[in-house]
C-alpha cells in the first residue's frame, strides 16, 4: 500500500517496487497508462535505470531497493553511509515516508510528462500525407 502520487489516495501498489508511480497509474487510470505505454516505455526512477550506477556514500546501489521509491534519490545522494543506514532503520517500515530531493522532482516531472503526452502524438502514414498533398496542390509534376 502506498499514497498515489497522482491522486494522493492509498493504492494497492508496492512502494518498494522499481516504478511505483507507474503501477499506481495502471491501477487508478488504466486507460491513461495504456495510452502512454503505447507511446513508449515509462521513465525509470533514475535517468539511467531503476537504480543509479553508484551512490555518494559508496554503498551498493542495491541498498536503495530497501527504501520506498520517494526516498531513493535522497539516499543515493547522501554521502554519509551512517545516515543512509539510520534512514533505513527509521523511515522504511511502512513505505509512506519521503525526503524531498531534486532527483525525485525530476523523475516526477519526467513521468508526469510521459503520462500526459506519450501515446497521444499521431504519426501520419505516408499515404495520408501524399493524399493531402495531392488534394491541396494536385498531382501534376510529382513524378
Image (cartoon, grey):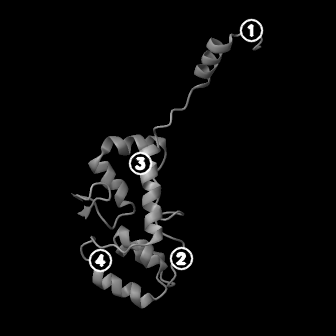
Sequence order check: which comes first, mark 2 or mark 4?
2
User: Element type at marker 4?
Assistant: loop
Q: Quadrant of residue 81?
A: bottom left
Residue located beneath label 3 in the image: 115
User: Element type at marker 2?
Assistant: loop
Q: Is residue 139 left or right of residue 11?
A: right
Q: At which x and y percent is residue 123?
A: 54, 32
The answer for how far apart the CA atoms under marks 2 and 1 are is 61 Å
Name the mark nearer the viewer: 2 or 1.
1
Give the residue displayed 33% in from the left and 68% down from the top: 16
Q: Is residue 120 left or right of residue 88?
A: right
Sequence order check: which comes first, mark 4 or mark 3?
4
Figure check: 38 above or below 105: above
Sequence order check: which comes first, mark 2 or mark 1?
2
Q: Are marks 3 and 2 in contact (CB under 8 Å)?
A: no
Figure check: 70 above or below 19: below
Dot 1, how many residues are within 10 Å of its Cα: few (below 14), some (14-19), or many (20+)?
Answer: few
Dot 4, how many residues are within 10 Å of its Cα: few (below 14), some (14-19), or many (20+)?
Answer: some
Residue located beneath label 1 in the image: 140
Give the residue displayed 42% in from the left and 44% down from the top: 36
Image quarter of the N terminus: bottom left
Name the mark nearer the viewer: 3 or 2.
3
Sequence order check: which comes first, mark 3 or mark 2?
2
State the mark number for residue 92. Answer: 4
Amino acid at each position: 500500500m502506498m499514497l498515489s502520487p497522482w491522486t494522493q489516495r492509498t493504492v494497492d501498489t508496492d512502494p518498494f517496487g522499481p516504478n511505483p508511480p507507474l503501477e499506481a497509474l495502471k491501477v487508478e487510470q488504466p486507460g491513461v497508462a495504456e495510452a502512454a505505454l503505447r507511446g513508449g516505455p515509462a521513465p525509470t526512477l533514475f535517468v539511467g535505470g531503476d537504480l543509479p550506477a553508484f551512490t555518494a556514500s559508496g554503498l551498493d546501489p542495491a541498498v536503495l531497493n530497501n527504501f520506498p521509491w520517494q526516498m531513493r534519490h535522497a539516499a543515493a545522494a547522501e554521502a554519509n553511509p551512517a545516515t543512509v543506514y539510520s534512514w533505513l532503520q527509521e523511515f522504511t517500515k511502512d513505505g509512506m515516508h519521503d525526503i524531498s530531493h531534486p532527483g525525485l522532482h525530476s523523475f516526477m516531472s519526467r513521468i508526469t510528462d510521459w503520462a500526459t503526452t506519450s501515446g497521444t502524438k499521431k504519426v501520419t502514414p505516408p499515404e495520408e500525407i501524399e493524399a493531402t498533398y495531392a488534394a491541396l496542390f494536385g498531382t501534376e509534376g510529382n513524378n
